[in-house]
Amino acid sequence: MQPLFNTLEPQVLFQEVPDEVSLGFTITGCKLRCEGCHSEEIWDGNLGVSLTNEAFAAYLKKYEGFITCVLFFGGEWHAECVF
Ligand code: SF4
């Protein structure tokens, strides 16, 4: 299966969404190049691992019963895949 895009290893997050346990994926390859960017390392789209449908399903299975939502940070540049 073709990779959707690369992401950093997902993190379990407790504060981003109130009353939810989130699995957060940071999508790499940001093309926005904001001045003063807090995460310039994620401008590199080769950073991280390919998030194929199979890999995404495997993460959901791994955290099944623990997480209550999934978050994607970034990814506007892959809108056709993320949304
Ligand atoms: S990672 Fe965030 S702050 Fe940095 S360039 Fe991209 S959108 Fe801007």
Image (cartoon, rainbow, N blue to C red):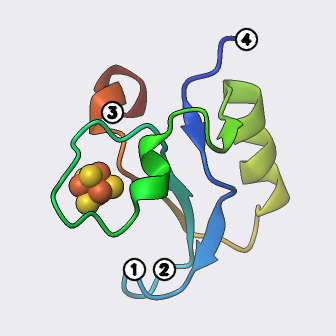
Residue type marked 3: Phe
Q: What's the CA distance linking mark 3 and mark 2?
A: 20 Å
Q: Is residue 33 above or below residue 20?
A: above
Q: Earlier in the sequence, mark 4 or mark 3?
A: 4
Residue type marked 2: Glu
Q: Is residue 34 left or right of residue 5?
A: left
- Reading the image, the residue beneath label 1 is 16
Q: Is residue 81 left or right of residue 34?
A: right
- Residue at the location (54% across, 55% down)? 25
Where is residue 67? Give x, y as percent. 64, 70
Of the 4 image quadrants, the one containing the N terminus is top right
Q: Is residue 77 above or below residue 65?
A: above
Q: Quadrant of residue 11?
A: bottom right
- Reading the image, the residue beneath label 4 is 1
Badge 4 density bin: few <14, some 14–19, many ≥20, Cα 10 Å = few
Q: What's the CA distance linking mark 4 and mark 3?
A: 19 Å
**Disc 4 residue: CB within 8 Å of ligand 1:** no
- Residue at the location (56% across, 24% down)? 4
On residue 83, the disc is 3
Q: Which of the four quarters of the rendered structure image does ligand 1 lie in?
A: bottom left
Of the 4 image quadrants, the one containing the C terminus is top left
